[in-house]
Image: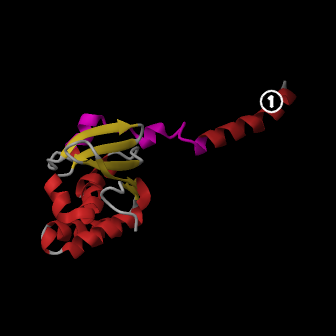
Amino acid sequence: MRSLFRPVLPALLLVVLVAGGCDVLRRDELGEVPSEAEAAEFYARHADVSAVDVKGNVIELHVRQPGDQLRRGGSLWARVGPYVYLLSPATRGLFEAYPAVAAVRVVTSTDRDREVARAMLRRDALGPSQWRHAEALLGHALQPGTEQPRMLERLAEWGERYAEYDYNPEFVPTR
């Protein structure tokens, strides 16, 4: 009887160690992702958010970008559109409240449902000091807005540095 357990014990120990490295044993520690309604609450102050979807552990925001903004600001506003939401205190708060959320994706589109841009920020892309810098950039960019386009450019550049993004070439020509 004793010799029967000897070969099984190391294999059993290996299974427990491997499972411990997976999310199988950590599900309670990670918590749950929010419902669509719970995720939408974080962005309730943003009037242009038309829908919030939960796709696995990714929260996806759909944002209507005003046509006059795109006409006035052209490719700069097309580029900066997703980062207004991704680099906001709302996204940071969502990540803090729901550790199981892996990323937030923002898809901007025109009033006629033509996609303008999409960008995704992963949970671990920004540390605390980078979040503070991102929020400061966002605040500066939204205050003067079109009066100081360079601030919008800096916000877009910061977002492009830390997020995965794709722009519709109709709105943002390839550089």
The residue at the far right in this view is 3
The residue singled out by tag 1 in the image is 5
> Is residue 127 positioned above or below 37 on the image?
below
| Location of residue 92 by image quarter | bottom left
Q: Residue at image x 33%, y 43%?
A: 60
Q: Position of residue 7 (x, y in %)?
A: 83, 34
- Image check: 131 left or right of 100? left
Q: Position of residue 22 (x, y in %)?
A: 57, 42
Q: Is residue 22 magenta?
A: yes
Q: Position of residue 39 (x, y in %)?
A: 27, 41
| Location of residue 127 by image quarter | bottom left
Q: Quadrant of the N terminus?
A: top right
Camera-side residue of 24 and 150: 150
Q: Quadrant of the C terminus?
A: bottom left
> Is residue 22 positioned above or below 71 on the image?
above
Q: Position of residue 150 (x, y in %)?
A: 23, 75
Q: Is residue 97 magenta?
A: no
Residue type at the position of mark 1:
Phe
Camera-side residue of 168 and 64: 168
Dot 1 falls on a residue whose secondary structure is: helix
Q: Residue at image x 20%, y 58%?
A: 70
| Location of residue 51 by image quarter | top left
Q: Residue at image x 65%, y 38%?
A: 16
- Image check: 2 left or right of 90? right
Give the magenta-colored segment's residue range.
Answer: 20-41
> Is residue 81 positioned above or below 58 on the image?
below
